[in-house]
Amino acid sequence: MRNVSGSDDPAHGADVKVTLADVARRAGVSIMTVSRVVNDRPGVGEATRARVRSAIAQLGYRPNIVARGLKARRSRTIGLLVPDVTNPYFPDIVRGAEDVAIRHGFTLLLTNVIEDVDREASALLAFEDRRVDGVIAASPRLDDERLLPLLARHAAAVIVNRRSDPDVAGSVRIDHEHGARMAIRHLAEAGRREIAVLAGPAYSHAGRERLLGADRETRERGLLLHEHRIVPGPPDVDGGARAAHALLAHDPEIDGLLCFNDLVAAGALQAATELGLSVPRDLSVIGYDDILFARMFTPALSTIRAPTYDLGRHAATMLLDRMRGEGRGVDIVLQPELIVRGSTVPAPPPEAHAADRTRKGVPR
Amino acid sequence: MRNVSGSDDPAHGADVKVTLADVARRAGVSIMTVSRVVNDRPGVGEATRARVRSAIAQLGYRPNIVARGLKARRSRTIGLLVPDVTNPYFPDIVRGAEDVAIRHGFTLLLTNVIEDVDREASALLAFEDRRVDGVIAASPRLDDERLLPLLARHAAAVIVNRRSDPDVAGSVRIDHEHGARMAIRHLAEAGRREIAVLAGPAYSHAGRERLLGADRETRERGLLLHEHRIVPGPPDVDGGARAAHALLAHDPEIDGLLCFNDLVAAGALQAATELGLSVPRDLSVIGYDDILFARMFTPALSTIRAPTYDLGRHAATMLLDRMRGEGRGVDIVLQPELIVRGSTVPAPPPEAHAADRTRKGVPR
DNA sequence: TTGAAAGCGCTAACAG
DNA sequence: CTGTTAGCGCTTTCAA
């Protein structure tokens, strides 16, 4: 019973695949009957059904998804595109999406495009070649001009972290403008007036929305966000360190720094240390995303928490809906949350507040 | 030219797929000729080849990998199994494997089994149903009894972080026994005598090897590793915090702690803080893996660096070899490296030593 | 309730 | 150099 390889044949070594025909022969029925049983379709007598079931079990039959996909035009596979799994922001999205997908019998084809737009485009084509049933593009960097036609060729698509044409793809995103506004407001309330932004990759849509929010919020507070205090750069620790170093060395007036994400913020914290600046005394640093490690930095990083797992979960759910032709025109916008820690204010509030309740895998 | 959807038909919306037959008709040749051109096979005149090429370009033809896989029995897909992408240890492996795979025209089917052995087994079967060309199992938790038959059904397989029967699967692993020995030696040389181990999941093979190394090394140094100072637990921050809290609260003598991985160590650092212990004064903590964030903890975490990216790279290379029937019987064992930071010794040495050279995305 | 025939899009093997 | 035939394992359609 626990023998996956069938009882007739120990099936040591590969390529001894049992087909519908084998099962049919064994059960003394036609291959169509077996197919019906396998797919739980009506039109098979109880006795026959039982006989077929037992043949399936004996032979250890498993349907060949490739063959099924060729005929039936569905693969029960979802293509998931992420810029870089190495950034802890994305694995949470992956897990959210995967949990939903698996529960519905789908498998994820994950592609990591390493922050490379061309690889992004070719990954989308590769998904198509493999006839995935739908795609989720997490934080795509391609411009609409190139992205939308590529997505339009898929039966169903969802974009994470960016607005989209609802006919082409659903959209699940975070209100980044609001997130950036919260961050700026927090910096301002901490008394910071000379604010700079490490803006991340120029092609990031989320980044642009945050910049918009930061710009508006500073303006409304009568602060200035000088253009040369908006510094683009790669969305990783190294990129953050370099950008922050250059920025702070040339412009020591800066006392508040909003970072593209927590990795960039980690780099900024390092740069500050190298330059002999004390955080938060001389400089307040706020990140974005609230990755698991943000609270372990020194000082612990204030940040804007993005509900990443939910982002993935909603994206997959929405995709499944769209595959069934439902839910077109539904967009989901999730609200981020301000998390205050030691990198922006001298005396961090007690850590164990309500904000920590949604995060799994973290003590308390 | 840049029009992916073909020039005849704007092909807005999905399911307007161009087939070999379409191209053949357009080029006025047989479908076999087109197939030869697509696959860069000889036996087609230059003129014809050019004509076919242009038809392919005009129609935006892309081969249907599903159909090809059905006939040719290869999908150019590799199944990659990881316990949990949320642990920064694994994304590095993923990237290493993916870089190699993509360079050779393969795609990764990634499955995250969330530290669940049953999901691990079913993921392996799902790979089979999809007729992947080979599988890489990263740190599989299944016991040999269950794992090996599952892998044997695949044409090619590689196990990461664990020994294996070379007929069934290749093996790329880290010399964990040695790694644990280095860790213990380091603790001992720092004057620690009362050593405990947060051993991670009982089913982890890597964990067992490390325990073996720790046990031998302590013995050889005339130290004792009491059985009740070996505490299993989940391999995440939360698990580490709980285990460390319980252990240290009941056994305050402990002055050296070897952790299953850096996440567990992070939890241990938190627990130490909660218990009012100063690291490294009262307690030295050493992790394992050297994830990107280890250096950002407070204090910065001493750890055993595992060459993760290389692990993935070698695994994929070995798998590709085995698919071609080469390299059976070749095992790869990589050596880990001791990284000393502030969590084990009071005065951390200058950070920017040679050890940092292999790690990408980190300043300096 | 059951089965036979046709074909998804492609490639291997053989013919011309 | 080019094309024809057969068939991968399955599901859809239609007939019994």
Image (cartoon, coloured by chain):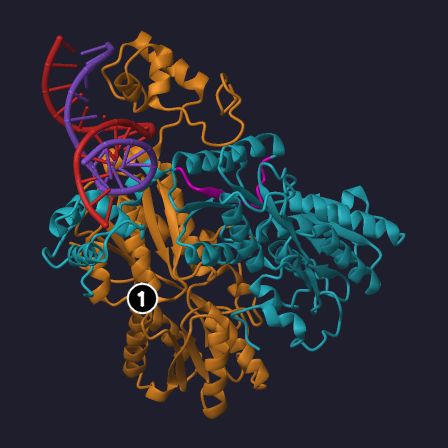
Chain colours: A cyan, B orange, C red, D purple
Residue A135 magenta: yes
Crowd around label 1: few <14 · some 14–19 · many ≥20 (10 Å):
many
**Which residue is disc 1 drawn over?**
B141
The answer to whether A128 is drawn above or below residue A314 in the figure is above
Secondary structure of the residue carrying numbered label 1: loop
The answer to whether A149 is drawn above or below residue B201 in the figure is above
Query: Could you tell me which residue is drawn at 18 percent across and 62 percent down?
Result: A3
In percent of width and height, residue A187 lies at 79, 60
Q: Is residue D3 left or right of residue B230?
A: left
Query: Could you tell me which residue is drawn at 52 percent across and 31 percent down?
Result: B13
Query: Could you tell me which residue is drawn at 28 percent across and 83 percent down?
Result: B219
Subunit of mark 1?
B
In percent of width and height, residue A235 lies at 60, 48
Q: Is residue A15 left or right of residue B130?
A: left
Q: Quadrant of residue B103?
A: top left
Inspect this view and state whether residue A31 appears. Answer: yes
Q: Nearer the viewer, residue A87 or A315?
A: A315
In percent of width and height, residue B205 lies at 29, 68
Q: Is residue A51 left or right of residue A89?
A: left
> Which span of residues is magenta-colored?
A131-142
In percent of width and height, residue B325 lies at 18, 42
Q: Amino acid at mark 1?
A: Arg
Inspect this view and state whether residue B226 appears. Answer: no
Question: Given the current orientation, which residue lies at the most extreme right position?
Answer: A222
Residue B119 magenta: no
